[in-house]
Image (spheres, rainbow, N blue to C red):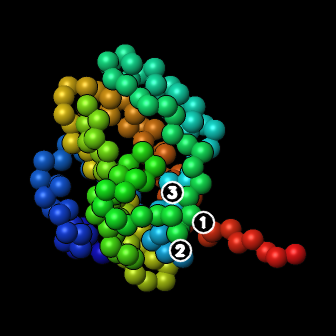
């Protein structure tokens, strides 16, 4: 899929990109459904990631912002992934989605608005495009994001790897 096709495959994505301050697109191939991929990504919560959220708590305080607790510990199943705009998705809320095509969620804070999107390209294996789209609101937005950016790339890549792992199946005894 070419970049131009990616942006026209999702309604409202061109509008969302008009005033973007940061965007990155990462790809990974896998033999899971879009729902399974999202559930795996959003369930990814190792101890080192929880530690980084703890460090973030102190950093955002220095910038005069708040963090509501440390996300993590959520085990999401494919069946629990919502495609309904407005529904919660961990600390995000679903913005737009279509089964086996795309899923976008976002969060707005005082310093920035961030969207996490996944577009799937059919095939065997499927190709997943993971988009991070950021809009800054004040001077603290770029300051905050540039400090966390190296960790952001690491975290998103690890989330993607978790997303393409086949779901565990319980066997009957």
Q: Cβ–Cβ below 8 Å for labels 1 and 3?
A: no
* Residue positioned 21% across, 42% down in the render: 135
Q: For the view shown, which residue lies furthest in the bottom direction?
A: 123
Task: Say which element carries label 1.
Answer: loop
Task: Say which element carries label 2.
Answer: loop
Q: How far apart are marks 3 and 2 (CA)?
A: 12 Å
Task: Say which element carries label 3.
Answer: helix
Q: Mark 2 points at which residue?
A: 32
Q: Cβ–Cβ below 8 Å for labels 2 and 1?
A: yes
> Where is the C terminus found, in terms of image quarters?
bottom right
Q: Which of the two residues, 3 or 52, is positioned nearer the viewer here? A: 52
**Nearer the N terminus, badge 2 or badge 1?**
2
Residue 16, position as x, y percentages in the image: 17, 55
Q: Distance between the residues labelled 1 and 3?
A: 10 Å
> Where is the N terminus found, in terms of image quarters?
bottom left
Q: Mark 3 points at which residue?
A: 41
């Amino acid at each position: 899929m070419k970049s131009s096709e990616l942006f026209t495959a999702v309604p409202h994505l061109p509008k969302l990109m008009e005033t973007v301050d940061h965007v990155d697109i990462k790809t990974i191939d896998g033999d899971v459904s879009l729902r399974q991929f999202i559930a795996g990504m959003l369930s990814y919560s190792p101890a080192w990631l929880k530690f980084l959220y703890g460090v973030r708590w102190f950093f955002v305080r220095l910038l005069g912002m708040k963090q509501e607790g440390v996300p993590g510990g959520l085990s999401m199943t494919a069946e629990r992934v919502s495609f309904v705009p407005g529904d919660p998705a961990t600390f995000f809320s679903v913005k737009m989605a279509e089964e086996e095509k795309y899923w976008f969620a976002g969060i707005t804070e005082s310093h920035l608005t961030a969207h996490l999107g996944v577009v799937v390209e059919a095939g065997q294996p499927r190709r997943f495009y993971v988009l991070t789209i950021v809009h800054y609101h004040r001077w603290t937005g770029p300051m905050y994001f540039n400090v966390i950016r190296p960790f952001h790339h690491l975290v998103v890549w690890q989330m993607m790897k978790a997303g393409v792992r086949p779901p565990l199946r319980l066997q009957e005894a």
